[in-house]
Image: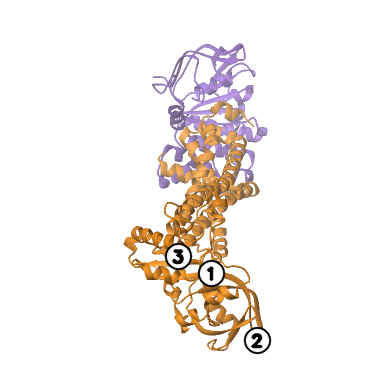
Chain colours: A purple, B orange
Amino acid sequence: MSLIRLDHISRRYEMGSETIHALRDVSLTIQKGEYVAIMGPSGSGKSTLMNLVGCLDTASSGTYELNGTNVSHMDDNQLADVRNREIGFVFQSFNLLPRSDALHNVLLPLIYAGISPEERKQKALDALTQVGLADRIHHKPNELSGGQRQRVAIARALVNKPSILLADEPTGNLDSKTGVEIMALFEDLSRHGNTIIVVTHEEDVARHARRILRIRDGLIASDEAVTNREPHLVALAGP
Amino acid sequence: MNLVTEFREGLSISWSAIRSNKLRSGLTTLGIVIGILTVSLMATAIQGLNQAFVQSISALGSDVFYLEKFPWERVDEWWKLHNRRDFQVDYGAALMKESRFAQAASVEASWNYPVKYKDRSASSIWVVGNNAQSALVRGLTVKEGRFLSESEVAGARPVCVIGSEIADRFFPKESPLGKSLKIKGTNYEVIGVLDKFGKFLFANMDAQIVIPITRFVSEASRRPYVMLMVKVQDPKLMEEAKEELRGIMRKIRRVPPGAEDDFAINQQEQLVSTFHRVGGIIATVGLFITGLSLFVGGIGIMNIMFVSVAERTKEIGVRKAIGAKRRTILIQFLTEAAIVCLLGGLLAVAIAWPGTLALSRFLPVTLSLPVIALAIGISLLTGVVSGFLPAWRAARMNPVDALRSE
């Protein structure tokens, strides 16, 4: 069974009298444990695809099965539940809550999941340790560097053990060195069996993945395995 | 996620949101403070007014008829009453001779006169002309000395019985008994001091001087308005007593058969019903006007909550992305509005406390627990009602659009 199965998905927007076809009849499957990059210029429909896969939006037509469940016709609250259990979001601008410390930001998905206070604290600490921030748990976002903020966001995305880690330009607001560190973290997570989807327009970021989907004009233009993976990782894997 | 957790999370979010916008939250709260304060003070004042009235009314006595020229109610054709003859002092004795129901009849007239004792003087003291039965009818008791006697009234003797405040004022260090008090230029011997009676809406009973009615009439520079207060023996037979008194009065005043009464028999009940009508209007208008200020405060809350929702659109998007349901967001913002209003309510009660104490010098008011509970309840309700629309807008936001906003 595929983790993600999109079957003839279309997404149209009404803009005044005009209809915009953001996605046209896209079909796609992604297996558990895959590391996929979605590429495309702005306006290609890649953000729409990401929103649909991330259950933030629903398709105009077609079927979306996530982990064996048809989510195409779910209402707002059901989708919120699916996002909470199945999807971990990582955003370009981190999107941490500014008034909450790192720990509380990571706790939030667990609070929404209704997990008991003791258990959620333990899980949040584990997730922050996993991203190397065990010593920063009481720092507010503005007391952390960009890389550290993105690590908190990744910890928040991972804390509920979601089926998919969905990252939208995760290195877009970081300098290249920090970006590399974040991509190394993704590599590590991928090796531990997490399913990762990265949306990006940067070729070298995409080449960290093992499969690249190129979107153009609302269609999948190409879908290929990565043969020449990004050399940073080779360097990082070394001594 | 259960409601308790949601509520607790909402509380902590709201608290930090309120703290990070101290000035804005403070100003918004101020609107609620003013609203709740005016409403609760108005409610307290109305309550006090009612209570003061009931006390004063009961001082009139439910078993007493007030016989006089004019009725207490408003009369449309007042000019018809204008030519009624004055009441005479001897009506009291004549009435007592005839009546089976009356226990006592007090003849009464009063005016304000200057009073002097040695170097102490007052320009305007309430001087009441009474007869010997007045103490019983008016519920006055004597602390020192005695009340007016029949012979003193019959002989129009220059004697007086004084209220306790008058005694304190003119005779602070000596016994007033036997002293000579100068009222409107004439000396009166003090023969008694009244017990403390209390202040009432209409008059301060402790600041009166009682002299024989006969003396009062002869000394008066203009014709006094004389009336009778008749105490009925059996309060269960008020209706019968009233009919009898009416007949007697018609006879005394020689009203021809078939003609209308040229006098009025008033009683406490008339005032009560008039008061309830007027009091009801005052309460409605007062609470409506003060309620408006609370309404304005509520609009302030709604306004600021719309701003708060707008500037936290991105946060709402993030929360939704990681699994917040509509209800969660709704509760979060409702809690915030409710907390601002609750703080306002508590602050208002804290201010109303000394306010009520100040008010209690004029009216028998206390800030009762039900009023406090009501004030806090209303402030919470204001928060929830005025916060609902903004919170509902936040809860219904589309996560994609919310995340895209900056």
Of callouts 2 and 1, the N-terminal one = 1
Residue B81 spot, x, y in % from top left: 54, 54
User: Mark 2 = which residue?
Assistant: B118
* Amino acid under disc 2: Lys
Q: Are marks 3 and 2 in contact (CB under 8 Å)?
A: no
User: Nearer the viewer's eye, disc 3 or disc 1?
Assistant: 1
The quarter of the displayed image where residue A147 is located: top right
Tell whether B392 sits left or right of A115.
Answer: right
The quarter of the displayed image where residue B134 is located: bottom left
The alpha-carbon separation of the residues under discs 2 and 1 comes to 27 Å
Q: Is the residue B237 above or below the residue B326 in the image?
A: below
SS type, badge 3: helix
The alpha-carbon separation of the residues under discs 3 and 2 comes to 35 Å
Label 2 crowding class (10 Å Cα cut-off): few <14, some 14-19, many 20+? few
Give the label on residue B109, or none.
Answer: 1
SS type, badge 2: loop
Residue A135 visible in the current orientation: no
Which chain is home to disc 3?
B
Residue B313 spot, x, y in % from top left: 59, 34
Residue shown at the point (63%, 17%) measured from the top left: A43
Of callouts 3 and 1, the N-terminal one = 3
User: Nearer the viewer's eye, disc 2 or disc 1?
Assistant: 1
* Amino acid under disc 1: Ala
Residue shown at the point (51%, 55%) measured from the top left: B46
Give the label on residue B60, or none.
Answer: 3
- Quadrant location of the N terminus of chain A in the rendered image: top left
Residue B71 spot, x, y in % from top left: 49, 56
Which chain is home to disc 2?
B
The alpha-carbon separation of the residues under discs 3 and 1 comes to 16 Å
Residue shown at the point (62%, 81%) measured from the top left: B186
Residue A190 spot, x, y in % from top left: 50, 29
